[in-house]
Amino acid sequence: MRQLSVISRRLAAASVGLALAAGAAACGPEGGDAEGGSSDGKPTRGGTLSVLNQQAQSDFDPARLYTSGGGNVPSLVFRTLTTRNRENGAAGSKVVPDLATDLGTPGKNATVWTYHLKDGLKYEDGSPITSGDIKYGIERSFAAELSGGAPYLRDWLVGGARYRGPYKDKKGLDAIETPDEKTIVFHLNKPEGEFPYLATQTQFAPVPKAKDNGTKYEEHPISSGPYKVVKNEGDGEHLVLERNEHWSAATDDERKAYPDRIDVRSGLDAAVINQRLSTGSGKDAAAVTTDTNLGPAELAQVVGGDAQLKKRVGTGHFGYTDYIAFNPKVKPFDNPKVRQAIAYAVDRTTAVNAVGGSSLAEPATTYLPEQASFGHTPYDHFPAGRKGNAAKAGELLKEAGYKDGRLTVTLTHDTTKQDEQGPEVATAVQDALKRAGITVRLNGLEHNDFSDRIHSVGTEPGLFLTGWGADWPSGGPFLAPIFDGRQIVEDGYNFNSGLLNDPAVNKEIDEINKLTDLKAAAKRWGALDKRIGERALTVPLFHPVYKRLVGKDIKNVVISDWTGVLDVSQVAVR
């Protein structure tokens, strides 16, 4: 979850340094939305969809993939027990059945989850999909040579921490039972009411044991979805998918599977991708991207731009928050009034402008993103207004013992240009705090050094820029890694930057995790966010917005709040 969330956010926010071709201006703030398509008429089957991306679809093995990554391409090949609802906006943040008949039956206070498979499920070779195949698919994800997928199962399943995968442990994982070919039962270490969300991860895709060839499985994984892999060159640089004739729409309510063929090419420059999409000549007329955002340079051309091009811009929201983090173990941030003063002093308008303006970011005063599925509860404990409240910040500094109302601090940031944690945002924060009498010295670090520094308890700075995104649209994977004291990692990658270890907060997290009513849980997550926010351990700055071009022949554009990117399972080219 944690590292991939950062990677997903970086891909989604990738900016472009070159302008579009003359006469092909990009869309502006109102240029398109998730309802848009590129032409009139109902979508129909047939044709080839091209996907133009920067990052390769590498490690194309369900054990090694993260559902939140890959721009939805893996879900064309790998079906799972549950999946995301393939609808626009907020409706797309719901979890729905996929291979399973329902979202699962919880037992023993949500420590046991039972699923039953649908009838008629088949692989690309026509053989039936069984519960034993799902069990085996999960077990192989524990093998060291197939690492890279979501880490939850190792923590959640009974005995998961000790299990080494089926290549070394032939006995299998006792925490997963398959009493018959259509039933699978999971035994958990503790209550997990959000297990249906976890069951969307690609580790829950079935893998027939007889076809498993270890690390080479990614070259031709056995499809359970509407498409099968017919070519995989350069470890995902060029991926070609064609129809799986044994997939049945009668068993799959979510994937439309309109195109006959999907051609995914990666390793392209962001500017080249947007140039090709805007021009839309030849095969590029039926092309999309799942990892390349329109940047400020293109959006600046919107005013008076091409009206038809505007219609080809989709807008997406993925649950992510960029924020200022404090380490309260480092002076002067051990003083809550200093943290509050900084919260009052921030100028969210300039921070938003630093990443491209209101078209590409929305100001944030809450830690949880502004979506109902997360349990978003509006609050603004330290109202800074649009431009910062310098007067209130100065008062708090005096109360903190700085009689002249002045303070000097160091802000650590990434040196990556046009990054949400980079020099532009850092400078915006520096300028805002200066107006409140706070002198900010900037400490820019190369990306890898920056990431290692801020995620180590021993080297974490007192003040730095960071961000967080969730693997599924809920408050759980958003709040627990950052504020659950039991997740503080002393000798590895740590994400609880405020080093908060409050028994009351930890207990509330446990209580919410027992809830299988996801709406009730969301309400509790929102209340917890508001309560934690009073401590000023973070200063939320903004939530990114993603704008993507599609080719002129693309129909049925669907962008959900789960991923924030175009869902290739819904796209048609005719």
Image (cartoon, grey):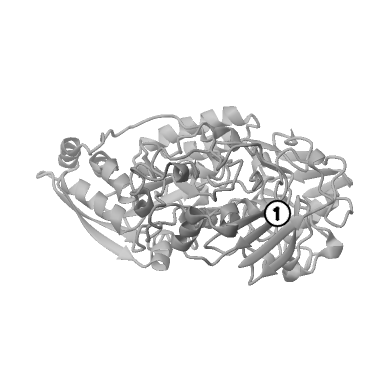
- The residue shown at (38%, 56%) is 22
Q: Does residue 347 appear in this view?
A: yes
Residue in front for this viewpoint, 65 or 300: 300
Mark 1, secondary structure of its residue: helix
Observer-nearest of 45 and 256: 45
Q: Position of residue 218 (x, y in %)?
A: 71, 65
Q: Nearer the viewer, residue 499 or 433?
A: 433
Q: Position of residue 212 (x, y in %)?
A: 80, 65
- Residue at left offset 41%, top offset 29%: 378
Looking at the image, residue 149 sits to the left or right of residue 389; the answer is right
x, y percentage for residue 60? 67, 62
Q: Kindly identify which residue carries mark 1.
A: 203
The percent coordinates of residue 82 (x first, y second) are: 71, 42
Quarter location, residue 373: top right
Q: Residue at x 29, y 42 (%)?
A: 348
Decide if residue 459 is on the left or right side of residue 232.
left
